[in-house]
Image (tube, rainbow, N blue to C red):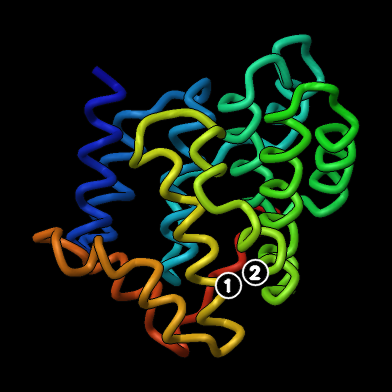
Amino acid sequence: MRHLKWHAALQSIACGDFPEARRRADAALARSDVGMRAATNWRLLLAGQAPAGRSDLEHVRQLLAAPAGTAEIFHTFNLALALAVEAATDDFHALARRAAADERPDHRDVLAPVVQALAEVAAGRSRAAVDLLSGLGEKAERIGGVRVEHEIIQDTLARALIDTGDHARAAALLHHRTTTRHHHAYEALILTAGTPTVAAGPH
């Protein structure tokens, strides 16, 4: 049930109703729903909006340190999104190094650059994020989840491209979504030059 309500929050983001997205996220998601909460908030931040209620950073650190923290790539990716919302730079770099040293190809070749790119965006270094994410292409799908869940990597790249002045490439990246989806206010905001990426940082 919470997962369905989370999708309703994403639909509110797509329609540009950001207060409703925050309301739905806060009403539906528990403290343990770190991944869904982070995915909601990172989208809001990419669109220049204030986040909904955030996860406790120390709790995120505990989850990453647990045996299951890096056992499954999609779970780790969601924890990385939580770090992005908090702009937890040191934690990011530690996780990126850990993933890069992992013997599993998806962790090493997909998760590591994605985590590092999120760190670069959170630190305002969009050009570095573009370089890291541009090389992934369809490999980004190996991060797991359904399409709407791993599309956030594409969103992050588009936002970084806008921030570096490459509007044409960003528009091309999201062209299919902006021309085929009935609601795409979210994508339009990502593609709007001058829309600031809100930095969340510490509570």
Kindly identify the residue that appears in the image at 50 percent across and 71 percent down.
Answer: 159
From the viewer's perspective, is 176 left or right of 183? right
Residue 99, how many percent across, how many down?
81, 33
From the viewer's perspective, is 179 left or right of 95? left
Badge 2 density bin: few <14, some 14–19, many ≥20, Cα 10 Å:
many
Q: In the image, which disc is placed on residue 148?
A: none
Kindly identify the residue that appears in the image at 60 percent across and 44 percent down.
Answer: 81
Give the answer, above or below, for where 42 lies relative to 50.
above
Residue 86, how many percent across, how many down?
67, 51
For badge 1, the amino acid type reads Ala
Give the answer, above or below, for where 138 lies relative to 64.
below
From the viewer's perspective, is 14 left or right of 81? left
Corner quadrant of residue 44: bottom left
Residue 100, how many percent across, how many down?
85, 37
- Nearest the viewer among 171 and 199 is 171
- Nearest the viewer among 18 and 114 is 114
Check contact, mark 2 vs mark 1: CB within 8 A: yes
Q: In the image, which disc is placed on residue 130?
A: 2
- Nearest the viewer among 48 and 190 is 190
Give the answer, above or below, for where 109 lies relative to 47.
above
Residue 121, how many percent across, how many down?
67, 65
> Dot 2 lies on which element?
helix
Mark with earlier residue (2, 1) = 2
Kindly identify the residue that appears in the image at 24 percent across and 17 percent down.
Answer: 1
Q: Which residue was labeled with disc 1?
A: 160
